[in-house]
Image (tube, helix red, strand yellow):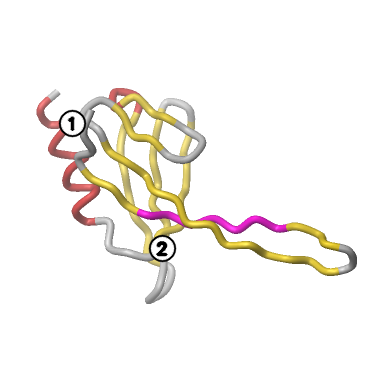
Amino acid sequence: MSIISMISYTYVERKIKRTKKVTIPHSKDMCLYTDNIETENESFHINSVFDISYKCVSKESGFLYLHTNQGMFAYTIHTDPGDFIAAYKDIKKKR
């Protein structure tokens, strides 16, 4: 199955090492296929995703929201999600 669109998202892992609090940023990819959306830890069937929205919080980042039948999932992104959202809406339109 080929990837229709992909967008990178980040999350921060927080750990305590000895007496210091350490934050470790991670970057992963969210992939849109014709029948599902996959992240590092989740996979959503395209019919389970009701909508995708975006909220800009600064010049450098924003939140990409997946509205699903399992709840809402927020992902921090640092690029414009316009192409990803348009590709999702195109797939949903064809269904």
In the displayed structure image, the side of residue 27 where residue 34 appears, left or right = left
Outermost residue, bottom side: 59
- The verdict on residue 68 being magenta is no
Q: Which residue is mark 2?
A: 62
Local packing at callout 1 (Cα closer than 10 Å; few below 14, some 14-19, many 20+) is some
Q: Is residue 90 left or right of residue 85?
A: left
Mark before the other along the chain sequence, 2 or 1? 2
Q: Amino acid at mark 2?
A: Gly
Residue at 40% x, 73% y is: 60
Compare residues 48 and 77 and report the one nearer the observer: 77
The spot of residue 53 in percent (x, y) is 32, 49
The label number, if any, that marks residue 36 in the structure image: none
Which residue is the site of mark 1? 92
Amino acid type, callout 1: Lys
Q: Which secondary structure, mark 2?
A: strand
The image quadrant where one finds the N terminus is top left
Instruction: Name the residue located 34 percent from the left edge and 55 percent from the top edge.
Output: 54
Vertical placement of 36 versus 66: above or below?
above
How far apart are the alpha carbons under marks 2 and 1?
23 Å
Classify residue 62 by image quadrant.
bottom left
Which image quadrant is residue 35 in?
Answer: top left
At which x and y percent is residue 12? 60, 58
The span picked out in magenta is 8-14
Q: Position of residue 56 (x, y in %)?
A: 37, 65
